[in-house]
Amino acid sequence: MTNPVESADQRASVAAMFPTLTDAQRQRLAAHGRERRVADGEVLVEVGQRDIPFFVVTAGSIEAARPSTSVDRVIVTLEPGMFTGEATMLTGRPAITRLRAAGPGTVLEIPRERLLDAVVRNDPELSDILLRAFVRRRQDLIASGGGDALLLGSTHSAATLRVREFLTRNGHPFTFVDLDRDEGAQDLLDRFDVGVADVPVLVACTGDVLRNPSNEAVARTLGLNAAIDAAQARDVVVVGAGPSGLAAAVYAASEGLDVLVIESDVPGGQAGSSSRIENYLGFPVGISGADLTARAFVQAEKFGAQVLVADGARRLACDWPRYELEVSDGSIVPTRTVIIATGAEYRRLPLVDVARFEGAGVYYAATHMEAQLCRGEEVIVVGGGNSAGQAAVFLTEHCARVHLLVRADGLSESMSKYLINRIEQHPKITLRTRTEVTALLGGAHLERVEWTDRRAGTAETRDLRHVFTMTGADPCTAWLRGCVTLDDRGFIKTGPDLTRDELAAARWPLERVPYLLETSLPGVFAVGDARAGNVKRVASAVGEGSIAVSFVHRVLHA
């Protein structure tokens, strides 16, 4: 018998995902579009189509379906008062489902840009309904393995993990086939004429087959940046889509600025890889970094910011008062101001073979994806900061035991008290102080780990296949050397931290001194983990992103 509580929850979820608009709501929408007839079987939106219109069913019904070589699989049938669309309506990316009329009828059709400008950004009631539905529909597609891409890969492949993480963190639904476990895997390989050496293999709805693709190739094939004109001059370009960068994008776009965010890898930065953040204001039970990032991403797009992924900044042309950013594919992005939010990367373990095992036993994130790889096993977490503590606690939900290795005598200097208490009291966590990983051993995948107790001077080798390393971080600022002033560790100096001599050497051209977060270039700001003197907390990163926008306005109106 169905649990009535679960049944009610399911009904509420479906109602939020596929709501029926009231007559008054439909009339407000009608002012922004046109009603037209549709014939039985008429395709309104095809998979891969760009510039997708928004439809409200006024008579008859519309089916949303996943195309198939035999019979399309219908996801949902929309009745009168219901509407089409999911996250692609915000991003402008190509459609991942087919929409067709299930019988003759009529629909209200609204162009996408008109919907965003007149409704999503200016009608609070309808905006809430539409955004909630768009986000939940995308979440459902992800959870069900829907979408327009098939990924064939191995859980023992670092490249497979990279592509899975790229698709997941960018919120793109895909079907994953584990070649190590799926009985029909060889048939799939034969069908697409690929070998094991080609893994991972991405098959797109266009028929393109990508063998061990780069993230840039995945983004290009799936059209993740298709709606973005990189050559368009912007009010502000934000480099980096971590918490500080996304906060800057939200505030800048909501205040009417033309914003482009450039992200070299995946949105979220280090925070996006956190399993649970419990000390962020407003989330008493915690929130994963991925969820926080996804919400910020939707907010930014709601207000009109665009996000260019897998195409990082390579060079900043330092010609004040107009700047140009060169991105990875060689494109030039002109802008009046810049906010640098490139963050920092965890340092590699100082071991010879660490690069060989990255993604195949050595990881720099602890999300549900990585946890699936080590379920029921013993693992090592290296690091004494909050990220390492959060990872250790999270991994106990999936792993048999967690060995937390720190070089210091304890955790009190670098970790929040609430995490220290949980670690000390958790029966699955063994804290090993003054201990370091000194060797990684194995073949294609990590098989054994040696650690050394510096206090006792003893080394021990264990049959452990997974190491999560979250030690000190280095700023992602190498591309800025010779352009803005950096400190001796490569962090960007800003505001009052810039000395008169440094400003003179940088040829600061203005009578005023740099604003609080402004670099040695006027109108170029630095926020978050890339900035010298930053406070390594998500809340402070978000605050810096929003504060920087206030100074951007001053520069633009000077």
Image: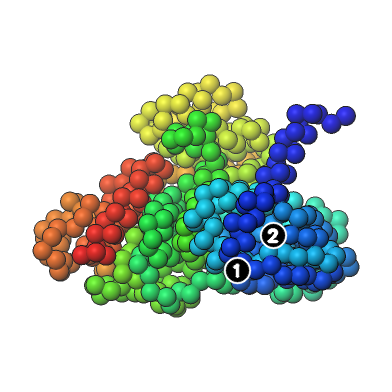
Q: Please tell me which residue is depicted at 33% across the width and 42% down the height of the picture.
A: 535
Find numbered disc 1 in the image and state the secondary structure of the residue it sits on: loop
Q: In the drawing, does residue 203 fall left or right of residue 546? A: right
**Amino acid type of disc 1?**
Pro
Q: Is residue 436 visible?
A: no
Residue 373 placement (x, y as % from top left): 67, 46
Q: Please tell me which residue is depicted at 73% across the width and 59% down the height of the picture.
A: 57
Q: Earlier in the sequence, mark 1 or mark 2?
A: 2
Name which quarter of the figure residue 417 lies in: top left
Q: Please tell me which residue is depicted at 35% across the width and 67% down the height of the picture.
A: 235
User: Dividing the image into 4 quarters, which one contains the N terminus?
Assistant: top right
Labels 1 and 2 touching (C-beta < 8 A): no
Q: How is the image coloured?
A: rainbow
Vertical side of 450 occupied by 434: above or below: above
User: Dividing the image into 4 quarters, which one contains the C terminus?
Assistant: bottom left
Judging depth in this view, the residue of 233 and 501 nearest the camera is 233
Label 1, label 2: how far apart the Cα atoms are: 12 Å
Question: What crowding class fits label 2: few (fewer than 14 Cα within 10 Å), some (14-19), or many (20 or more)?
Answer: many
Q: Mark 2 — residue?
A: 56
Find numbered disc 2 in the image and state the secondary structure of the residue it sits on: strand
Q: Mark 1 — residue?
A: 111
